[in-house]
């Protein structure tokens, strides 16, 4: 399902409206929740435009400085080498809390994203959100929206595709916007 958000924002490839609702409590729409203004509208449009953008290639992403973003990547999930219980990488459930009532429980593990043009990117789950309702498992095709970074390459994953001796390109949450992960809608 493609969701059209207006004349200035391209269609966003989310599964359904419930998936888009996950953005409501995040900074992706924070400018719209303050007092209405033209400047706030422009900030929100710019942020949402990224969600409808074409994915960035591995070569272009690998050339970015740390902190640049938000950037859109698309690829296939893979568990980190040696990760235990790598079946489900990210899931969202509802639970019951004695004091708070119904709560949303989001559990995520860092994972590798194999990009379509043969490069690997480390996905740091900290501070991120799964936008689509279905759990993310190894082998799933996903889109990831976040900020460029680099992490130490302890397993030698980057040596063949990135060539930066000890560093692996990574994508993470930013200080302003959380990382978003959603299943690829075909």
Image (cartoon, rainbow, N blue to C red):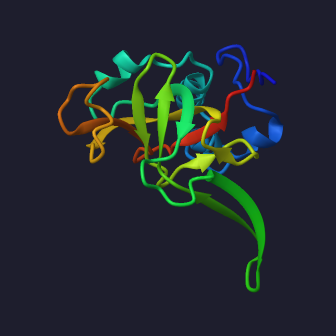
Q: Is residue 17 left or right of residue 122?
A: right
Residue drawn where x is 52% and y is 55% of the image: 109
In the image, is residue 84 above or below residue 144?
A: below
Q: Nearer the viewer, residue 176 or 76?
A: 76
Can residue 72 be seen?
A: no
Asked if residue 68 lies left or right of residue 115, the reply is: left
Q: Position of residue 154 (x, y in %)?
A: 27, 48
> Residue, x 76% and y 46% (percent of image)?
133
Q: Quadrant of the C terminus?
A: top right
Whether residue 3 is visible, yes or no, is yes
Image x and y of residue 18, in percent: 81, 43
**Quarter of the picture holding the N terminus:** top right
Q: Residue at x 56, y 15 (%)?
A: 54
Measuring 29% from the left and 44% from the top, which residue is drawn there? 151
Q: Residue 75: percent from the left, percent from the top?
A: 55, 27
Q: Is residue 126 above or below residue 12?
A: below
**Seen from this angle, which residue lies furthest front?**
82
């Amino acid at each position: 399902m493609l969701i059209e958000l207006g004349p200035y924002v391209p269609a966003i490839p989310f599964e359904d409206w419930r998936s888009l609702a996950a953005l409501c409590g995040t900074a992706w729409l924070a400018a719209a929740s303050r007092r209405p203004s033209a400047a706030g509208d422009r900030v929100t449009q710019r942020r949402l435009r990224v969600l409808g953008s074409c994915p960035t290639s591995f070569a272009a992403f690998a050339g970015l400085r740390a902190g640049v973003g938000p950037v859109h990547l698309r690829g296939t999930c893979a568990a980190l080498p040696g990760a235990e219980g790598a079946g489900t990488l990210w899931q969202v459930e509802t639970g019951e809390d004695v004091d708070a009532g119904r709560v949303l429980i989001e559990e995520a593990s860092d994972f590798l994203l194999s990009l379509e043009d043969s490069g690997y990117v480390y996905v740091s789950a900290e501070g991120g959100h799964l936008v689509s309702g279905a759990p993310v498992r190894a082998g799933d095709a996903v889109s990831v929206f976040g900020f460029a970074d680099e992490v130490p390459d302890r397993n030698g994953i980057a040596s063949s595709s990135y060539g930066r001796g000890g560093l692996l390109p990574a994508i993470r949450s930013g200080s302003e916007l959380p990382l978003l992960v959603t299943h690829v809608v075909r």
